[in-house]
Image (tube, coloured by chain):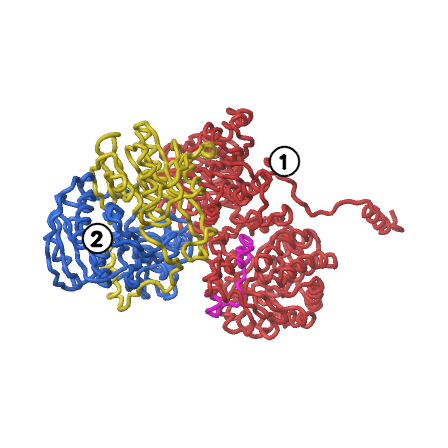
Amino acid sequence: MARDPKHDILFEPIQIGPKVMKNRFYQVPHCNGFGSEKPFSQAYFRALKAEGGFAGVATEYCSISPESDDTHRMSARIWDDGDIKNLSLMCDMLHERDALAACELWYGGPHAPNMESRCVARGPSQIPSDFEFLTYAIEADKDDIRYLQNLYVEAAKRARTAGFDIVYVYGSHSYLPQQFLTPFYNHRTDEYGGSFENRARFWRETIEMVKEAVGDDCAICVRMSTDMFLGEAGTQLKRDCLPFVELVDHLVDVWDINLSGIAEWGEDATPSRFYPQGRALPWQAAVKAISKKPVLGVGRWTNPDMMAEAINEGKLDIIATCRPSTSDPFLPKKIDEGRLDDIRECIGCNVCISRWEIGGPPLICTQNATAGEEYRRGWHPERFTKAANADNDVLVVGSGPAGMECAMVLGKRGMRRVHLVEAQDDMGGTMRWIPELPGLGEWARIVNYRKIQLDKLKNVEFIPNMKLSAKDVAEYGAEIVIVATGSYWSTDGLNGASHATIDGADASLAWQATPDQIMGEGKELAGDSVVVFDNDGYYTGVSMAEKLAMEGKKVTLMTPLGTVGPYMHFTLEAPNQHRRLHKLGVEIVPYHLPSRVEEGMVVATHIYDEDGHEKSFAADGVVWVAQRRSNEALFRELKDSIGLEQLKAEGVDALYRIGDCEAPRLTADAVFSGHRLAREIDSADPSIPLPFKRERRMVDAESVTREKAEYEAMYAGASS
Amino acid sequence: MRTVVCIKQVLQLGDEVEFTDDGLDVDPEYLDPALNEWDSFATEEALQLRERLGGEVVVVTCGPKQSEAALRRCLAMGADRAIRVEGAGRDPFSVARALAGVVRGESADLVLCGVQSSDAVQAATGTALAELLDLPRAAVITRLDYSGAGTAVVDRELEGGLIDRVEVETPAVLTIQTGINEPRYANLRAIKQAEQVEIDVRSAAGGGTPAYRIRKMFVPERGEGAEMIDGSPAEIAARIASIVKERLA
Amino acid sequence: MSVLVIAEHLRGQVRDVTRELITAGRELGPVTVAVIGQEPGSLVDAVNLDGVAEIVTVTIAAGEFENDAYQAAVEALIADRQPRVTLLGFTVNSMAYGPAAAVRLGLGFASDVHGVALDGDAVIATRSFYGSKVSAELDFPGADGVMLLLRPTVWAPAEGQGSASVSSLEVAAVPSRARHREIVEATTSSDVDITQADFLLSIGRGIGDKENVEMFEELAEKMGATLSVSRPLVDAGWMPSSRQVGQSGKTVKPTVYLAFGISGAVQHLAGMKTSGTIIAVNTDPEAAIFNVAQYGAKADLFDVAEELEKLF
């Protein structure tokens, strides 16, 4: 297949300072949980994007000093030679694949809680962070300012030594240089605060110094938020940013332009729930209009036509992505080869970001089960080995996300025949109705992508409208049976808070319902008022409340938790979701657990009320988003009633289950579970995941001896 | 009762194409074989007749060895016997003659064919076959009402959504339209069993003039694009309206 | 080179494809149009168009089309007039008798033909193979006559008053083994199933805002079309996926596919390009959909839509 000539512009090289990027695809700094202390995971993750065609790939935010330690969140670090060594692996692997390596030098100032280093940060003014509680910085004096600037210079030199081609003086998302620029953070009255020129001084000087130190060898990138949406107090496009661009344009080799501060950075890393792709374009275009240097910017770009349009219309020079590069590292290659229907498009769920927000875990991706597994499990998203037991037929029962993914990978691994059988009339399982919840339309890409891929696989057949009994499964003729029958929402109020059902809860009654019934079966609740009981913690309860409110019902959203949908804080959807609920007049009732329900009423108690006072809530209808339960019946019947021995007699050698029917989980994890089983279908026992590589320091005799000696030397001569 | 179903293994072309050296066909490397979509509906119809009226379903195809995969799909669905006749040309009349040679000996109550094949779209083989067998026929059937003897009442799907209800004397040849039923799927056991069935292979008698001869095959120029309608929005709308009304008449 | 055109009619109306056959036939030689029916005289005027040299009527017993009767009539006409080329529309009716007559008379035959030319004395027909991706030129060596079933909407319908001579041909009645009983209107299901619609009005990203969906919904209703959409509108949550046309949505083959603001991404085209007649309205003249459409207009969607509403 050939590239569409409309997309040629995306493959034109571009000069960035002393370097050349071979095309217009760039992976902008983003977190993956690997940092400098899991160097192989880091390098393999980034290298894969280069293999997929990205001409420039950045680290995540890279701390320049122990004073800027973001623990619990994972950043990269470039503090010392060991870090140089570790990050150089990433640079080498990127260079081997013809891509430039970028290092985003970061100093968090008051946002960095320093929970590992126990150092204290310096910042423009001593106001605690609006992002991290309990974090104060030293209010920097002139010496501190010189010290800080020197941190950037030394870090830039270390980055150069490691092999980085592009070095950032990163301010976006309200980190140090931008804190100086922004009145919200900078209440100084000396020459580093007050007027625009003063507020810009720190950043300008730092850029000058870094440029002088490494500018001949490395391209200098400045990443700036063009609008923090904090009104006059925040950074503003016309008042602060465009003048800053004019001020330092001659020093900068490439601009990385985004939006928002750090407290609501979902305005930049836009969830698809609230924003379409290319949201930042008007701001990026405004910078491009006055800068003489290349401008790059993110926008959750997945549509190559829109990418080309952005460049052709003079709004951007380089298409930068994070999330779309994670959901498909081969995005550029696929566009280049005209294989647009093979692109695994980002759905904007921000589950990847949620892992960083939670602090600690490596990133995962709903669409791409191999994200984060490049090194740990050796998974390559485009390469599949032929299964050693390929000479077998497989029956996958259920075509939700887990079943589809499993069938797809089994197909790609060359299994003789794979039948993906589905009781409903089309693929997708619950992912057929989830995208119909308000704002989640792009989530349908989970199904769309797999549908297209499955259709291409000659050894995979999709059979709809077939509900298989255990007997049907046993007699189906498959040597390997994989059950992927998903989950359902509990109908009796069973929930994780009380571990009990709720008196009166019965979704078979006309005035009660679960999300499955409403969305999947079209059940409608009569009346004007509804109580949605939510102990799920993610989007379902909140979305049901939103949907019912949009239909005109008076909605009470009740949860035993302190806030609704807390996981949405990690996906950056919470602020706008709360605005939405507020606008729709949804009454949020936290800390409450129903003790019983009767027609017309939900009776609940405050979970911290030791006297257990009951409060009544009027409700014509009740929606139970209490907890999910696996649809285990088929699997249990196969394993318990028929039994593995009898199955063997029928020719079924192996029985597995994946996804929600094993245990309800995030869609990303359901997809992962299907993928893993298929990747490991030829291992000794596919039901148990194979061990994955862990990057850790292992004890060896030599280091034990050395550490002991160092410790003793430290205390030699000390008084006891 | 015996129903004979004439099926075809069609060849599907992807996005890339290269031609054979003589320029008369697409290089087989670029073609993927599959059972003709219409024929799975025809086979299903035959199986439903057998379920109601008893008897036998025989599937017949005219094609090379690789077309046996299509016969096996039908066997996996539940057909009883399969016959492949080889050595005939690929145009509708050569195929019809080859099929007639086999069907003649089968004493069929009904002969079902798909309306057309997805790769050639001639919609001619079934009707030509009927003529060669000197049997009554009806084409483009979306409903079949047959008690096993006497006349069958069929619905023909005309353009524009109208149905022509016709009474056909039997034995007859009927060409079956998609959507008449929901073709059943075969499970893996049935597919495996179908792999083992022996297919009866015959040679076409040959003779007779082909319907046509291909003298050149090519990729049409992209310039064969849309006829552009010019003018003001009102003029454009008027033209669109007249096209729409004409097509749906 | 004489040409015989078999007129197609239903419920007393001559179908447009007949006029298209006349246009095609005119390019090859003098055209004789045959009208076969219970009261063929009533249809003569409708086929007396510019370029028709002769009209022959054949009276049959059946009130509507019956394939045995038509076959016998056509065979008699061919025996009588000895045309070099006999033209039928590639229609449901023609499928039921055309190939039978051709194989019986030893004629050359091809259907779904979209190009006809003469190479010296030889008739060359052009048609598609392999799902319309390739075309082929066919000839008919050794055949005295050729029967071609022409694809509707390719040739423009003939217009203008003709001055054809009119005569009739007596054809002995034959047993009609497939007898017309009645015409039935197909029942429409209440669920929206865009794959069953005969006429789809399809909207894409070009319509701009969600608010504009309603306007096209109303237009569709007025025109008697079912509304369908391309993927971006489903992604944005404006319409449910049951309305989506495309590789990951539904594949449709309506008689008419009228597209507003759809650029024609590969995945979308895969779902609708075998539609009967595709009409595309888009402001971008380079839109890929124009490559598969039969008719296109580079115009403002809303202006055209507004005008269309007045006509239905």
**What amino acid is labelled 2 in the image?**
Ala
Q: Secondary structure at mark 1?
A: loop
Q: Nearer the viewer, residue A110 or B95?
A: B95
- Give the yellow chain's letter: B
Image: C228 above or below A233: above
Q: Position of residue A424 (x, y in %)?
A: 40, 38
**What amino acid is labelled 1 in the image?**
Ala
Q: CA distance from mark 2 to mark 1?
A: 65 Å
Q: Position of residue A305 (x, y in %)?
A: 45, 62
Q: Is residue A126 left or right of residue A608?
A: right
- Give the red chain's letter: A
In which chain is the residue bearing label 2? B
Q: Quadrant of residue A188?
A: bottom right
Q: Which residue is mark 2?
A: B249
- Give the blue chain's letter: C
Circle 2 Cα neighbour tier, 10 Å, few/some/many (<14 / 14–19 / ≥20): few
Q: Nearer the viewer, residue C271 or A625?
A: C271
Magenta-colored span: A309-333
Image: A678 above or below C277: above
Q: Which residue is mark 1?
A: A684
